[in-house]
Image (tube, rainbow, N blue to C red):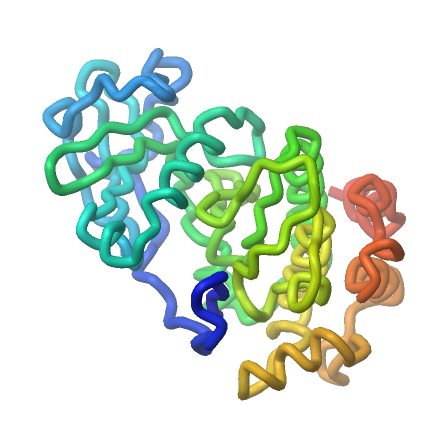
Amino acid sequence: MATATSTAPALSLKSPSRANKPVDVADGNQAAAVKPEAAGVVRTGKPQWSLSDFDIGKPLGRGKFGHVYLAREKNTQAVVALKVIFKKQVEKHDVLKQLREEVEIQSRLQHPRVLRLYGYFHDDKRVYLVTELAPNGELFKQLQKEKRFDEPRVAAWVGQLAEALTYLHRHHIIHRDIKPENLLLDANNDVKVADFGWSTVTGHKRTTFCGTLDYLAPEMLGESYDERVDIWSLGVLMYELLVGKAPFDAEENEQTQERIRSDAVAFPDDATPSAEARELLLALLQKDPEQRLSLQGVLDHPWLKRHAAAA
């Protein structure tokens, strides 16, 4: 997916997937994992660790600024994910402020559907973020494998994300980059919101152009916006999970932007969701944010309630 920034209006096309696979603990025994909270490993906001405090396991993923590894905290034996960010890359791309805001925001969040950031530390060359482990990896990887999902699974994820976004918005946080690559799956295949690199804390409207092109709300393409851009992204996500592609995807970036601004939502003949699901999608993908369904409206929607009752 293309990534939009305020300094790079020429957006690239959808990026290739990262090498992130479902993981076990370092010794290969998932049942042996110690929960960091139970082990007292949480040191959020207090950089008291060093790399020598961890046993490093296999790589879990690779990103633009560094890598993610499986790790075990030696003192507590708690199994975590260790995100290693190279300072040279941060400086090269001038994202130090963005990294600081990501750490400040995520370190304060405690919600079952938000990936925990337990702490951080750094050395001369790298910054290390100690996070909760999501054993089943990125939702994007699962989507690549299965192409699309059945309605009960998507309904569960949409409900979980609506709860997470309600929590974020209550604390005046706009995520601004909800997409499958930034959603991780825990051991129960429940979703957790991750990667707060484009998030912001605000009590007023914003104008920064950022996020991922396929998921950008119409108002972000030309005017100020508020937290309702996350609700639009939730609608795009729901559509892609059910249909297998983003609703306004096009070969050229300019075409995608124009489709987001102008095109009605259409459903392919070979992957048409149920009437209730279509109704919810159309309510989420309203061009006018004033007409867009609220998160409470999502949670109260008959489609979610029906699938929750059947689960």
Count of numbered circles on the image: 0
Percent position (x, y) of residue 38? Answer: 40, 14
Percent position (x, y) of residue 86? Answer: 20, 48
The residue nearer to you, when weighing 269 against 264, is 264
On the question of residue 150 being in view, the answer is no
Percent position (x, y) of residue 16? Answer: 37, 72
Whether residue 250 is situated above or below residue 6 in the rendered picture? below
Q: In this view, does 191 lie to the left or right of 50?
A: right
The residue nearer to you, when weighing 231 against 104, is 104
Whether residue 107 is situated above or below residue 138 in the rendered picture? above
Tell me the residue at 27%/54% (across/down): 65
Query: Where is the C terminus found, in terms of image quarters?
Result: top right
**Splitting the image into 4 quarters, where does residue 256 fall?**
bottom right
Percent position (x, y) of residue 199? Answer: 53, 44
Whether residue 171 is situated above or below residue 295 in the rendered picture? above
Q: In this view, does 219 lie to the left or right of 47?
A: right
Whether residue 125 is situated above or below residue 54 in the rendered picture? below
Q: Is residue 170 left or right of residue 123?
A: right
Tell me the residue at 35%/12% (across/down): 40
Tell me the residue at 74%/75% (across/down): 261
On the question of residue 128 being in view, the answer is yes
Tell me the residue at 52%/39% (across/down): 188
Q: In this view, does 181 lie to the left or right of 309?
A: left
The residue nearer to you, when weighing 12 against 116, is 12
